[in-house]
Amino acid sequence: MDDKIKTYLEDKKVQYISLAAITLLAGVMRFYKLGEWGFWYDEIFTLRDVNNIFDLGLLDQQLSRVFIYLSVNQIGTSEWSARLVPALVGIISIPILFFPIRKMFGSGVALLCSLFLAIAPWHLYWSQNARFYTTLLLFYTLALFLVYFALEEDKPWYIFFAFILFGLAVQERLFSVLLVPVVGLYLIALWLLPIEKPAGFRARNILLMVIPTFIIGLVGSYQFIANPERWQVAFGWINTNPFWILSGVIFYIGIPFLVMGTMAAIYYLIRKNRAVLLLTLAALIPILVIVILSMFQYSANRYAFVTLTSWLILTGIGVWELFSDSRGLTWILAIGVLLILVLAPLSESVMYYQFQNGNRADWKSPLTLVNQIKKTGDKVVVTNTRLGDYYSEGYETENYRRLFWEGNRPTDEGRLWFIVDNNLEDKLPAVLHWVEQNSELIANFDVNIQARTFKMRVYLYDPAQS
């Protein structure tokens, strides 16, 4: 790369203008159609908790939930207001993470990573969800960075702030404890591998990490330690398999980023780069743990969302290395690689906005249709009455389990509108079979995403015509 370009990128004014432009791009992408997608299953749980926030115990509170509560209470409950906080956190994550990444790898890598995060489909998706994932990722990533700087610069007070952020991440969701094996294996690798040790690699700092980790882990998991049945009910059942977990992670992160990130990790590990060693463990260990857990308990590929920033940074240093080492016209090839990494997620975003309903089940459309054509006295049956009631117009929806209790078939309930989704197929297949055999399909609102289909169909059961 031309030395003039490197000097140009070292200009703070250029960096901040570029960062502002990237942040603006992230804002446009996250606010575009923010309130258009209907709520889906998990988001309605957030609204439930927000409405009951003062009934929740201290250990059940989340910083993201508190801010969502403030948003919906000041603006009013809607898809837009409930997603406002996750979207804002997703946007501000870009300038916040820019500075520690610049400190680790320089301004060029930091700007590339900011761009990749701004257009990352997975980050966009969770920024447009009334959930906690963007907040969790920010806390988790900052805690990881602070651990690295504490060891590199021998500043134990960094560890104190790292554990504040780690505690906030665990408060958002317990699976943030996946940071523990990442840091633990990093310390073991520093001890065993023939690699230069950082200045802070000493017993004092290691103890400062171990003791608070144990305390935070104990506090975060206390609800399950005190009541083991709660864990069994929530997670003690197998819902997927390792292949589905791994294929989902590959899809959400993106093959171009996985390939470039892996190659960059290998390249820099050979050169014994400690920062890359930590990021490689942060990119791989949570995915491996989730894949193993899926074989004997509930698991989901969204838990691997905490690895996203590590993959993007590894990709960024790989691309920057290509530009830095380019000679003559070889910079054209580096531009080609960068275009692949930019156009691939942007093409996914086009599908996300235009054809895939924000990558979620479409609950709004079927209930809007039923509201328009149902008759007085008709009942509407759904798998989640909170979600059904939100989109109903003044009436209460019915639950499948109540109508079909102990093999009962609701032949004397009058006209019934059935909203069929994936949860009915997964949890009550016999009920789904009865609905399909005895009712008329009125409308299909399925959302197709690669190899996955979010089923959403409307059936009418009319006893006068059955």
Image (tube, rainbow, N blue to C red):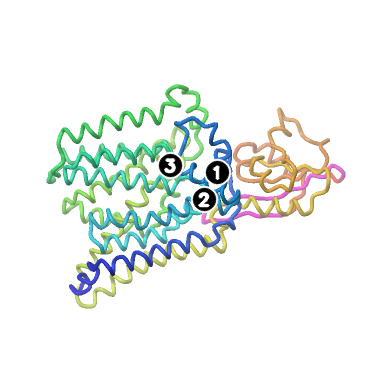
Mark 3 or mark 2: which is in front? 2
Residue drawn at (63%, 42%), measured in percent from left and top?
425
Check disc 1: other Cα within 10 Å, few if <14, some if 14-19, many if 20+. few
Farthest residue toward the top?
226
Position of 261 relative to 54 (above/below): below
The answer to whether the residue labelled 1 contacts the one labelled 2, judged by CB atoms less than 8 Å apart, is yes
Q: Is residue 45 left or right of residue 398?
A: left
Q: With respect to residue 37, does 5 lie above or below?
A: below
Q: How far across and down, in percent of the image, does residue 155 sit?
A: 19, 42
Mark 3 → mark 1, Cα distance in angstroms: 22 Å
What's the residue type where badge 1 is placed?
Asp
Residue 154, visible in the rendered structure = yes
Whole-percent x, y for residue 114 in the image: 34, 60
Residue 245 image position (x, y, % from top left): 44, 44
Q: Which mark is residue 242?
A: 3
Three-letter amino acid code of the residue under disc 2 = Asn
Q: Is residue 452 magenta?
A: yes
Residue matched to label 2? 129
Mark 1 and mark 2: span between their CA atoms?
A: 9 Å
Q: At label 3, which amino acid type do we have?
A: Pro
Residue at (32% x, 47% y) in the render: 142
Magenta range: 443-464
